[in-house]
Amino acid sequence: MEAHAIIEAETREIIRRRGLDVRTGGLEPLIRDVAADYDQRSASGAVPPVRDLDTVVAQVAARIGGYGAIQELLDDPSVEEVWINGPGQIFCARHGRSELTSLVLSEPEIRGIVERMLVSSGRRLDLSTPFVDALLSDGSRLHVVIPSVTRRHWSVNIRKFIARAHRLEDLVELGSLTPQSAAFLDAAVAAGLNIIVSGAVGAGKTTMLNCLAASIGARERVVTVEEVFELDLHLRDVVGMQTRQPNLEGTGRITLRDLVKESLRMRPSRIIVGEVREAESLDMLIALNSGLPGMASVHANSARDAVTKLCTLPLLAGENVSSRFVVPTVASCIDLVVHLDIRPDGRRCVREIAGLPGRVENDVIEISDIFHLREDQLVRGDGFPPHAERFARAGADLSRLLGRDAA
């Protein structure tokens, strides 16, 4: 039996005999006492030695007690997000609205919970790396920032991935799309159009990417690139890659730019960039401009703002990158922008679907209004998407999809 299994079994036996509550702050000290006793026995050869006692303690604590007092929030299917601003400030979000919980945790308890969450992620948190993004075993995304970057307390954010929709049809049932707009987006994906999903934090960009990806053909090979794994694509041929932090020596870092470049060597039929934030946007545009279909998400306030942002972010790649190259490149390789919003009642919706015909005037990219939100209903605009011939090759009738004669 391995060391961690022996320590876990002995700890569980003590908990059973004493009738202890594993969700209290006394769990980790108990495991450390058991581990210290085990370490003494291993010195005499009575049991197998253990190399990293702290890691074993975190592993056993996570297996026995989960994530302490916040485990109940993580198990609640109505809770979408949990964040901790301090020992007495623990919030959660339900249906897009935040609320202060009655939970109170000590600073050591918060640190212990974070250590348990990070133990299986391969990512670290210390003074040299004061913030971290990591993926939990259940698919939730963890973000932590520690002092002195924060003023006083550890700031912890856990975003649960609650998939209420897996296909565009599911978004229709939820009221985020109309049948007509869903059919149009399904045809756009099949036709190989390049699609940007934009919106605010928590607007449902990842869910929309997952739903759009469900319309990708079964024979296509998809490569995804993300900061931390969030996409959950149910496709036959898909490879997912995520970034990596530098090691203790400061080497080994893998950025989104590295991954976008690497993805092109993997014979993809299309690529999906989970979120475009910085200079990797340049590499994505170059990839999409080479005839490779793709999708990505970006934070923005509107479809127009998303296009403007895509014209600005590539300039971060270096002084030799100019808007004279970027603007026409965006106009020629981005075909659709699907912009998402959160209603006052917390519901997510598609606010607009815009097309980029490819025309630029005075460094401003023309945008056509294909669908927009009017009185809580997504209605047909007067614009048309580019590349009608691609829709035809995919067997889609644009005039039927859009209800008007296609331009």
Image (cartoon, helix red, strand yellow):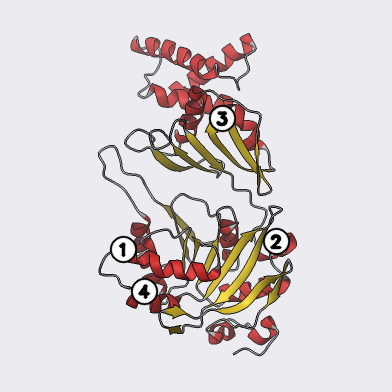
What whole-number distance in Å separates the C-alpha atoms at marks 2 and 4?
Answer: 36 Å
- Say which label, 2 or 4, has the lower sequence index: 2
- From the viewer's side, name the closer residue of 254 and 79: 79
Q: Quadrant of the C terminus?
A: bottom right
On residue 67, which mark appears?
3
Crowding around mark 1 (Cα neighbors within 10 Å: few <14, some 14 to 19, many 20+) is some
> Mark 4: which amino acid?
Val
Circle nearer the viewer, 1 or 3: 1
Q: Which residue is mark 1?
A: 317
What whole-number distance in Å separates the C-alpha atoms at marks 1 and 2?
Answer: 38 Å
Question: Residue sitting at 42 percent across and 77 percent down?
Answer: 291
Q: Which residue is mark 4?
A: 326
Q: Is residue 54 visible?
A: yes
Q: Which residue is mark 2?
A: 170
Using residue 150 as the reference point, say whether residue 346 is left or right of it: right
Q: Is residue 263 visible?
A: no
Q: Measuring from the top left, give residue 154's x and y in whole percent.
A: 47, 32
> Mark 1: which amino acid?
Ala
Image quadrant where residue 286 sits: bottom left
